[in-house]
Amino acid sequence: MINIKNIRSKIGPKSVLIASILVLLVIGIPIWLHNRGQQANIEKTVTKKTWYTCTMHPSVREDHPGNCPICGMKLVPLTNEEHHPADNHSVTMSEEAVALANVQTEVVGTGEGAQEVRLFGKIEPNEQQEQIQSAYVSGRIEKLFINAVGDRVAKGQSLAVIYSPELYAAEQELVSALSFPAGPQHKALIDAAIEKLRLLNVTQSQINEVVRNKKASPYVTLKANTAGTVVEKRIATGDYVSQGQPLLKIADFSTVWVMFEAYERDLPLIHTGSVINFTAEAIPGKTFSGKVRFINPVLDPNTRTVGVRLVMNNAGGLFKPEMIVSGQAMVNMNRYASQIVIPKSAVLWTGKRSVVYVKDSSKQVATYELRQVTLGESLSDSYVIIDGLAQGEEIVTNGAFAVDASAQLAGKKSMMNQGD
C-alpha cells in the first residue's frame, strides 16, 4: 500500500501543487467543455422557441398555439426580431402571423374611376302636388260626399255641402243690390256684392243662379280644387267648421318623391343631377333609376343624415307612399384624379394623429413601416391623403390593428406609442 505521507516528504510541497493542477486540468477541461455545449444547446433551444400572443390582448404570452384566454381569438406567433432586424419604425411578421391576422395590402393610387355610395330611403307623396281643402265659410257640414281616406276625387267634384248663415247674408246683399233702384250706385253695389261672394269661394255658376232667381240660399257646395286621392279626412257630417279650417287633404300620386337619407360622409360625392339606381322591397326583380332633384340644405341632428330627393313618374300607381327602397349611386371620382385616395380601413386614428402601415417590398420577410399621414377630404369609404404617402407604395388595408399589436409587443413605435 502506498504511503501518501512518504511520497509527500520525498517529492516536496511544490511538486504536489503542480501535480494537483495537472489532475484538475485533465479532469476539469472535458467537464467544462461538456457543460458549455449543453448551455449552448439550451440557449439555442430558447432562441428557437416560438411564443404566441393575442392581437387584441398583447399581454397574453403562451408557449403553444391555441385561443386567447380573454377573448377567445386565435393566438398568433411572435416574430424573433434577432433573425429579422428592423428599425424602430418597422415591424416584421412571420408568414403564419400574416395569414392568421388576414393582413391584406393594396398599392396606393389616385381617386380615378368610380365609387359606389349605398343609400336607403322610402317613397313619399309629392308635396308640390298636395292640396288642402279648407272651409271658405263658417257653418255646419250638412252632407259629406267623401266616405274615407283613399277615395279618389276629380277636380271640381262636390266634396261637401255646408250650411252657412254667413253665406246667406252675403247672398242677401247681392239680392238687395239687384233690387236697388237704377242709378249711379246701382252697378257699384252689385259688383261689390258679387266680389264678396267670390272671396267666399262661391263659384260663378252659383252667383249666376242667385242673380237669375234673386233668391239667397244658406247652402254652399265645397268643390275639389285638384284631382287626386284623399290622404287625410278631418271632418264628419254635422261638424261645425270655421272659415279657413282644413277639412280634407288631397294628394296627386301621378308623381312621387323617392327620399333617400345620405350620411354626411357621403355628401361630397352626391350632387344635384347624380344618378341613383334603386330597388323597392315591394317590387322585387325590378331596378329603377332617377336623378337627384334636390338635396336638403339642413342636416338632421338626430340621424346625422341629409335628405336626397328623386322625383319619379307614377302614372300607373306602381309606387306607394312609405315603400322602403335601397339605392346605389356610382359616383365619378375624376375630381380626385390627381390626389392620393386610400380605403378608410387602412387608417389607424388616435384622435390626434392618423397612421398607416407601409409594406417594405425590399425585405424577404413581411416588414411593415409605421407612417403618419395627413388626412384630407372624407369620402364614402376612403380618405384623400394630403401628405405622408406616394403613389405606388403598398399599404396595409386589412389587419392594420394586428400589425400594430405586433409592433407594440416588439417594443416598436406604434399607433399609441410614438417612440423616439
Image (spheres, rainbow, N blue to C red):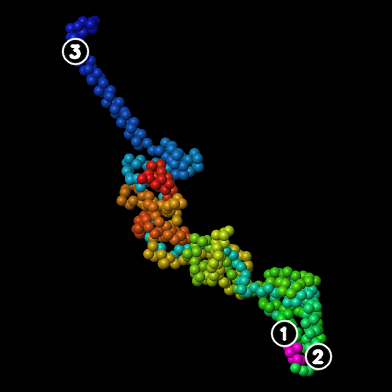
Residue 26 is left or right of residue 41, and the answer is: left
Residues packed near mark 3 inside 10 Å, few (<14), some (14 to 19) or many (20 plus): few
Pick whichever of labels 2 and 1 is earlier in the sequence: 2
Kind of residue at disc 2: Ser
The x, y position of residue 348, in whole percent, is 44, 51
Establish if 340 lies above or below 155: above
Q: Is residue 219 visible?
A: no
Could you tell me how far apart the alpha carbons at marks 3 and 1 are, in whole angstroms? 149 Å
Residue that carries the numbered disc 3 in the rendered image:
14
Magenta residues span: 185-191
Residue 281 lies in quadrant:
bottom right
> Which is closer to the viewer, label 3 or label 1?
1
Kind of residue at disc 3: Lys
Secondary structure under tag 3 reads: helix
User: In terms of depth relative to the viewer, which is nearer, 149 or 298?
Assistant: 298
Q: Which residue is found at the position 78% from the left and 94% from the top?
A: 182
Residues packed near mark 2 inside 10 Å, few (<14), some (14 to 19) or many (20 plus): few
Q: Which is the main secondary structure of the residues drawn in magenta?
A: helix
Secondary structure under tag 1 reads: helix
Residue 332 lies in quadrant:
bottom left
Kind of residue at disc 1: Glu
Residue that carries the numbered disc 2 in the rendered image:
179
- All told, the count of numbered labels is 3
